[in-house]
Image (cartoon, rainbow, N blue to C red):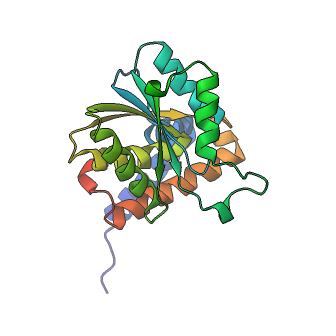
């Protein structure tokens, strides 16, 4: 076996050294931009704001959606919930959660025409299934654009799933991350933020490698 010339080893060592230096001096900027990539956002206007829930929806996400509505950035709200069987609901919660959300919105002064609650089936891949259910329903109401509010670092994967599901309907999706447990600034100093970031990077990779989202949408 031939030994590599010294200049190759020198180049490898220099590259490693430069990577260490860059990581040491610029790790804060790198981590911040990594967080921004996973949690995109912006100032948008659209036909509707989609608030992405699961078996429940965080109050902070609903408030963010209501603020967009009151500011005239959107015309309506759409809240996406998972369709939970009665036997899997939280103990003591006999009333359908979707009806609880509906009543709360009406109590806050909204009219039925101001919002739509969409219950999506729970089927793998869960996020993409919910995206198809939501956009199929909104397309029937001639929606052409939507601001998508998703929780934190889940936003990148959710945005790509909704963007992909919206292609047949020609619905434009604009992503907006909502953080309710921690802030995006210096997220790497919070254990739960590091855990969420790592989990969502892994799930995003799973969606891409599994072919649930086309690679061309990921950049």
Residue at image x 45%, y 54%? 127
Residue at image x 27%, y 57%? 214
Question: Does residue 2 show up?
Answer: yes
Closest to the observer: 56 or 195?
56
Instruction: Give x and y (percent) for residue 107.
Output: 64, 23
Closest to the observer: 94 or 172?
94
Question: Quarter-wise, where is residue 171 in the image?
Answer: top left
Question: Does residue 184 show up?
Answer: no
Of all residues, the one furthest to the bottom in this rendering is 1
Judge left or right: residue 34 versus residue 137.
Answer: right
Judge left or right: residue 77 versus residue 135.
Answer: right
Question: Quarter-wise, where is residue 189 in the image?
Answer: top right
Residue at image x 47%, y 12%? 71
Residue at image x 29%, y 35%? 141
Closest to the observer: 6 or 203?
203
Quick one: quadrant of the C terminus?
Answer: top left
Instruction: Give x and y (percent) for residue 143.
Output: 29, 33
Of all residues, the one furthest to the top in this rendering is 71
Quick one: quadrant of the N terminus?
Answer: bottom left
Instruction: Give x and y (percent) for residue 77.
Output: 46, 29
Judge left or right: residue 60 versus residue 116.
Answer: right
- In the image, residue 18 sits, relative to residue 4, either above or below, namely above
Instruction: Give x and y (percent) for residue 29.
Output: 51, 33
Question: Quarter-wise, where is residue 76 in the image?
Answer: top left
């Amino acid at each position: 076996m031939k030994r590599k010339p010294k200049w190759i080893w020198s180049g490898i060592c220099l590259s490693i050294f430069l990577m260490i230096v860059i990581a040491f001096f610029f790790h804060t900027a790198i981590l911040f931009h990594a967080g921004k990539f996973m949690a995109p956002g912006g100032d948008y206007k659209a036909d509707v704001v989609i608030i992405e829930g699961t078996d429940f929806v965080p109050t902070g996400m609903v408030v963010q959606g209501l603020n967009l509505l009151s500011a005239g950035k959107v015309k309506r709200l759409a809240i996406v919930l998972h369709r939970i069987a009665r036997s899997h609901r939280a103990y003591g919660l006999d009333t359908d959660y979707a009806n609880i959300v509906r009543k709360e919105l009406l109590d806050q002064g909204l009219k039925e025409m101001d919002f739509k609650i969409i219950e999506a089936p729970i089927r793998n891949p869960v996020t993409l299934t919910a995206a198809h259910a939501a956009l199929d329903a909104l397309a029937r109401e001639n929606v052409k654009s939507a601001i998508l509010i998703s929780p934190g670092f889940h936003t990148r994967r959710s945005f790509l799933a909704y963007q992909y599901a919206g292609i047949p309907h020609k619905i434009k999706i604009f992503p907006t991350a909502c953080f309710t447990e921690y802030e995006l600034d210096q997220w790497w100093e919070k254990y739960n933020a590091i855990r969420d970031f790592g989990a969502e990077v892994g799930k995003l990779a799973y969606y891409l490698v599994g072919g649930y989202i086309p690679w061309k949408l990921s950049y």
